[in-house]
Image: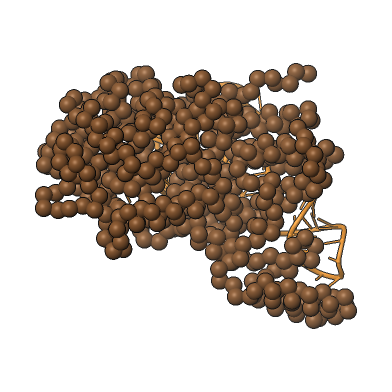
Amino acid sequence: MTETPSATPLTLYNSLTRSLEPFVPVHSGEARVYSCGPTVYNYPHIGNMRAYVFADVLGRTLSFKGYKLTHVINITDVGHLTDDADAGEDKMERMAAVQKQSIWDIAEHYKQAYWADIRALNIRQPAQWTIATDYVPQMVAFAQSIAEKHCYELDSGLYFDVSTVADYGRLARAATEEGEGRIEQVDGKRHQADFAIWRKTPAGETRQMEWDSPWGRGAPGWHLECSVMSGEVLGFPFDIHTGGIDHREIHHPNEIAQNQARCCTNGLDVAENSGAKVWMHNNFLVERSGKMSKSSGEFLRLQLLIDKGYHPLAYRLMCLQAHYRSELEFSWEGLGAALTRLKRMVMGVAQVRERAGEAEAVPGPRFGPFLDRFEAAISDDLNTAVALTVFDEVLALKKVDAGEKLAALAQMDAVLGLGLLTLDRGTLRLRPKGVAITEGEIEATLAARKEARAAKDFARSDALRDELAAQGVEVMDGDPLGWDWKLG
RNA sequence: GGCCCGAUGGCGGAGUGGUGACGCGCCGGACUGCAAAUCCGUUUACGCCGGUUCGAUUCCGGCUCGGGCCUCCA
């Protein structure tokens, strides 16, 4: 019997070719990944966070496969307009006006909120966070380098002529011509798809964020930022560029066009010409009541789930149960299901930990086939849903060495990122925001109930249990914790 | 109008040309004073109509329904 000695090759879906491709790093043994991060003009909603859970699993998988990972996530704090007609307001400027704060304060506040969510979801820190406003000089330089051959100037700014690069829009699979004329046109644009590289501050106005440039005072275009930051930090071409599936239509095709111009290449027949070899996009988290849209006003924040008593890692598990390229249906019921599963996993691992003791161990041959299947699943375009089932199978194995089992579980959790080796049941018991009862009161009532039970006064003990239930506390005699919050 | 995607059991969600993943729920059992928690076991599916095939949920065509993008969004 030959154990599979060689690791399963990593296969990833490349949006540019719309096909699964074996991962071949640009630099041997390395993986350089750039992920489109948030525009920090508002809180992220849980759908936004799915993109970072996805990017995190990708990064963890690359690490698991032995690649030296360099991951960069950007923070956009300027230039992202409220619409794509190059005529809208800057999102940052608008929120600053609404909240009567400086744009810098807005950026800082929402950046911190985003980072809090990143931590709560056990998303690993990237090698570098790039902040757009830190790269303005480089953006100007980038723009200058492509201006002559690929851009033209209008009163409102410097525009990129999409006809100057081959295969514009191939990523989106969109026709470049026609157009229903449904978006507001900017006077003078040569092609509907042309986009702003530099937006001039209108005469007589002053923006909170503006810089000098050869085209006058103004701000960089949104698409320019990602081309500049990814190229600066990772170098063209780098391995993988990730983002939400919505970016596949506009933002990334524009980024690719800029990269083609910058690299002085033309056609996209050679993947390197797009700046990144592989473009990956996660699908949306959807909610039946409508799309998860910020502009619709209300949206689900991670903090809301926490306030209701759902541990954030239950949301991460919910994401992992589905493939990143599939739409995922959000519901409270589904989130509750994930929390229940997470609790059981955590309890199972805790038992293994107890029996394993302190001894370090490595998984023996008994675990080989399982770990192979785990790796095969994760290597198959990140099939976390199947990988999870392998984890569960290993957890359920009887009569195996606890230390070895723990080591096997640890290897898998390093990819899943659920923190299963450090979490305990108590940590998952989040206090819902709405409840008034204190834990001291709960303990007191539980003590009284214990006495009643000892005295076989079941009427009283049941009454006390009902009393707790009415306040959102569920009594569980056979559970190590003894009680838990009831979720609405 | 244009481009694209999907349709799997109560819910979510994998996957496959032929032995019906998995999770949660339900049901049964163990445990419990009774419950809950936990553990064990069990149940239900592949939108409709054709075609290819020895055989299709899986491939092809049509239909119906749903969704996304084309306008800010991960």
Residue at point 38%, 54% (across, down): A108
Image x and y of residue A236, in percent: 37, 25
Q: Is residue B39 above or below residue B17?
A: below
Display colour for chain B: orange
Q: Is residue A223 above or below residue A87?
A: above
- The front one of A270 and A64 is A64
Q: Quadrant of the N terminus of chain A?
A: top right
Image x and y of residue A409, in percent: 71, 39
Q: In which quarter of the image is the C terminus of chain A?
A: bottom right
Q: Is residue A369 above or below residue A90?
A: above
- The front one of A281 and A212 is A212
Q: Quadrant of residue A34?
A: top left
- The mark total stands at 0
Residue at point 53%, 50% (across, down): A119
Residue at point 54%, 44% (across, down): A123
Q: Quadrant of residue A106?
A: bottom left
Q: Is residue A22 visible?
A: no
- The front one of A337 and B59 is A337
**Colouring scheme, one of rainbow, by chain, secondary structure, one colour:** by chain
* Chain shown in brown: A
Q: In this view, does A8 lie to the left or right of B68?
A: right
Residue at point 11%, 42% (across, down): A155
Image x and y of residue A256, in percent: 32, 30
Q: Is residue A68 left or right of residue A354?
A: left
Q: Is residue A313 left or right of residue A170?
A: right
Q: Is residue A27 visible?
A: yes
Image x and y of residue B65, in percent: 42, 49
